[in-house]
Amino acid sequence: MNKNVEDILNRQVEREAYSSSLYLAMASWSEVNGFPGVADWLYVQSDEERLHMLKFVKYINERGGHAIIPALKKPETEYKTVKSMFQEVLKHERFITASINEIVALCVKEKDFTTQNWVQWFVNEQIEEEANATKILDKLKLAGEGNLYLFDRDIMALRAAGAGGAKA
Ligand code: OFO
């Protein structure tokens, strides 16, 4: 496969792996700080990001490239509030969206229309990922800092209903 495309796809392997690690760190913080619903949502989200990473790994290798499994930087272990943590989630998802868009742009430049077509799945996925984080931030706004117990139960229900994230 085209070397520039292979390199940018490997960059995305690292970013998806970091997403998984970041959400795992957030899940762990939520769990030890009394937010089991939030933790549950983030554990599932972390699994989902690992699946994203695997999609890139498999695709690169399938196309004759070599997927490189990277070392990751350590994510934050402490978060001030649930709200600031979800603001981080949204910020991170926007960063991922920009990163996916860069892949599309490079595919066009290099005329790799097969990869351009393949990566469309992630273009659509990012619409949902940003919408989910925004939805949760809206709920947090409504709940206010004082009523996080109900918010925590709510996010658990949201996941059980299959909305707000949690799909492969
Ligand atoms: Fe959150 O979608 Fe992958 O990174």
Image (cartoon, grey):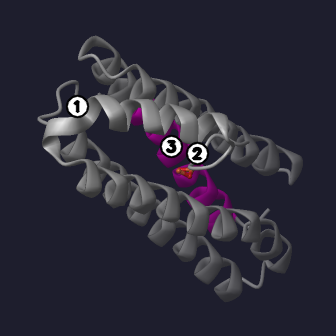
Q: In the displayed structure, does residue 51 sit left or right of residue 128?
A: right
Whether residue 168 sits left or right of residue 90 in the image: it is right
Q: Position of residue 39 (x, y in %)?
A: 42, 25
Instruction: Please give the name of the residue rendered at 25% of the width and 34% of the height, measured from the top-left corner.
Output: 148
Q: Quadrant of the N terminus?
A: bottom right
The reply to whether the residue tagged 3 has its Cβ within 8 angstroms of ligand 1 is no
Q: Is residue 25 above or below residue 137?
A: above
Q: How many angstroms separate mark 3 from mark 1 (CA)? A: 17 Å
Quadrant of the image occupied by residue 72: top left
Badge 1 amino acid = Glu
Kind of residue indicated by mark 3: Glu
Residue 78 as seen in the image, left or right of residue 19: left
**Disc 2, disc 3: CB below 8 Å?**
yes
Instruction: Report the magenta residues as a range.
Output: 3-24
Rendering coords of residue 41 (x, y %) = 50, 33
First in residue order: circle 2 vs circle 1? 2
Residue that badge 2 annotates: 13
Residue that label 3 marks? 14
Residue name at image x 66 percent, y 45 percent: 52
Q: Gap in Å between the C-alphas at discs 2 and 1?
A: 20 Å
Q: Secondary structure at mark 1?
A: loop
Front residue of this view, candidates 33 and 24 = 33
